[in-house]
Image: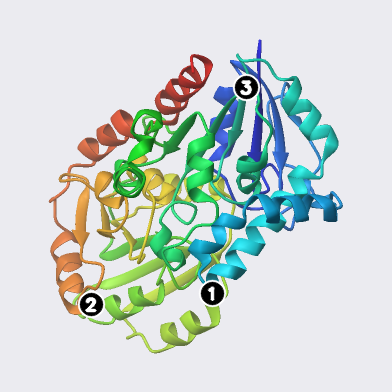
Amino acid sequence: MQSLLLFTSSFPYGKGEQFLEDEVEFLSEIFRVKIIPFSYGGRTIPRKLPKNIKVDKPLCLERIQISKLIKTLIASFPEMKKVNLNFRRLRLYLAALRSAGFLLSNKSILEELKALTDSDIIYFYWGHISAFAIPFLPNLKAKVVMRLHRGDLYEYLHDDYFPLREWQLRKVDAIVPISFDGRKFLLKKYPFTRNKIFVHRLGVKNDSFITQPSKDGIFRIVSVSSITDVKRVDLICEILKCIKSYRILWTHFGDGPLRKRLEEKIKKLPPNIVVDLKGFVDRNDIFRFYRENPVDLFINVSSNEGIPVSIMEAISYGIPVIATAVGGTPEIVSEGVGILIEKEFDPKEVANIIQNVLGSSIFDRNIIKNYWSTYYNAEKNYKRFAEFLKNL
């Protein structure tokens, strides 16, 4: 059986990277998988994994060797031309070298990488953190694969600069964006990557269950995201306060640093709008909610996205979606699945759209469910991806 070393941010520790829970199940059917997280992500108890998956201690527990930092600094000196005295870029560059230092200082991991054969896979789930070490790795027999999502892909989110990016892309054997929008972005800036880019969508599990719309005169809207600047959850308040003719129950799953600001805005909503902030919950609790409660609409108003797993989850239950047309979102919110709105939308116009959707039969939930099954079904997508890695 082939070996696969999977570098993550904190999975199987921490709260994030929930979508990896499904993917590793399919990877473990083909590979001997070893997971190497960068950190604990705030929680030292690992999530449940298939029995044949091993987990190494987080890389950040390794003591960085100063000599390694100096070597990487010297080797990457040409990168300073891109930094170009920009303080923010300099901070990103130095942080990247520090992240790389943890892996490069880990002798046991480096020896393990060198021992892999040409049928084995080194898989970086993100294009940052541990993946910053890619340009400095010795020549290896195993194939190096790097997935790209949103913050680790779109350079316009970081002063049009991503540390060591061109070096990474030249060194890896396969670049795997999760959307065709990501592929388009890469090809425009790095045309030499054309023959090594392979789009593989993420996916979520589900069965034949379809969430039903409300029938009691209260219309239920759901959103799922962290409460941060990029997710702009507070703008949902601006939309909902324009809706006067419906009783709305808005349920939000997720937490973040801007929660207090959101709570202040919620206090100013009219009495026909009731809000339930659930905070951070396990994804299985969200699935349980979809099974036990009617939901009329899912909403996402982010300023930037890869392809939101939260939307995959919603459409897997047949729930129609309203979302901003940013990043790869237009690839999932297609006609028949939901409605796309402009990034800089008018809250009143979106409120009118919502009122046209609520209580109507504009969307066929079976069509939405079938769209998920065709394009974002975890079993189909991750089996296909595992086979791709096997045959790379």
Q: Amino acid at mark 2?
A: Pro
At horizontal 76% and vertical 43% (from top left) the residue drawn is 104
Label 1 sits on residue: 85
Disc 2 residue crowd, few under 14, some 14–19, many 20+, Cα 10 Å = some
Disc 1 residue crowd, few under 14, some 14–19, many 20+, Cα 10 Å = few
Lower position in the chain sequence, tag 1 or tag 2: 1
Lower position in the chain sequence, tag 3 or tag 1: 1
Determine the CA span between mark 2 and mark 3: 51 Å
The relative height of residue 100 versus residue 344 in the rendered view (above or below) is above
- Please count the marks in the image: 3
The relative height of residue 117 versus residue 329 in the rendered view (above or below) is above
On residue 142, the disc is 3
Q: Nearer the viewer, residue 70 or 8?
A: 70
Determine the CA span between mark 1 and mark 2: 40 Å
In what element is the residue under mark 2?
Answer: helix
Q: Amino acid at mark 1?
A: Leu
Q: Amino acid at mark 3?
A: Ala
Q: Nearer the viewer, residue 33 or 309?
A: 33
In what element is the residue under mark 1?
Answer: loop
Q: Which mark's residue is nearer the viewer, 1 or 2?
A: 1
Horizontal side of residue 360 vs 2, given as left or right = left
Looking at the image, can residue 333 be seen? yes
On residue 347, the disc is 2
Disc 3 residue crowd, few under 14, some 14–19, many 20+, Cα 10 Å = many
Image coords of residue 157 (percent x, y): 42, 64
Horizontal side of residue 58 vs 391, given as left or right = right
Lower position in the chain sequence, tag 2 or tag 3: 3
Image coords of residue 333 (percent x, y): 25, 48
Image coords of residue 298 (percent x, y): 33, 57
Image coords of residue 346 (percent x, y): 20, 77
